[in-house]
Amino acid sequence: MNRGGMGVPEPDVLVVKLSDSFTESVQGLLRDAGLAGRERPVSESGPFPPAAACLVLAGGCEPDALDWLTQTRVGGHLPTFVIGAAADHRLAVGALSRGARD
């Protein structure tokens, strides 16, 4: 997507759907921000393509997000955000310790 008009495409936002929760909200948010969302299958391995960020949709299966973060080893090069509904601070601490930003 080219928002700047200078021929430089804006990077996509990767979306990993561990659940369907928050899918419509995230799609709307990206659309309103003028960003393109690109789904990355949960089972896909290998290096991550260049992207502005990675959103992990994990509403209702937050512990699975911790497993996914551990298995994929996103690392610090790609800002990664886990989106869930659980209020348990231990899940948040676990996600942060595995490389998520928030």
Image: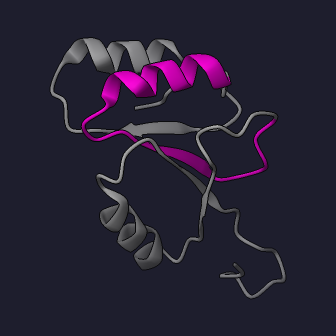
Residue at (36% x, 39% y) in the render: 58
Looking at the image, which is closer to me, 86 or 2? 86
Answer left or right for 98 relative to 50. Answer: left
Q: Position of residue 84 (x, y in %)?
A: 28, 38
Residue at (70% x, 62% y) in the render: 11
Q: Is residue 19 above or below residue 77?
A: below
Q: Is residue 50 above or below residue 71?
A: below
Q: Quadrant of the N terminus?
A: bottom right
Q: Position of residue 26 (x, y in %)?
A: 38, 62
Quadrant for residue 25, please give it.
Answer: bottom left
> Going by the picture, which residue comes out furthest to the front?
43
> Going by the picture, which residue comes out furthest to the left?
87
Q: Tell me, yes or no, whether the highlighted magenta stretch contains residue 61.
A: yes
Q: Position of residue 91 (x, y in %)?
A: 30, 18
Q: Tell me, yes or no, whether the highlighted magenta stretch contains residue 86.
A: no
Residue at (57% x, 45% y) in the render: 54
Q: Is residue 19 above or below residue 23?
A: above
Q: Is residue 7 above or below residue 73?
A: below
Answer left or right for 74 relative to 87. Answer: right
Looking at the image, which is closer to me, 46 or 4? 46
Quadrant for residue 102, please give it.
Answer: top left
Answer left or right for 37 relative to 84. Answer: right
Quadrant for residue 10, please give it.
Answer: bottom right
Q: Which residues are magenta?
A: 47-72
Residue 99 in sight from this viewpoint = no
Residue at (39% x, 13% y) in the render: 94
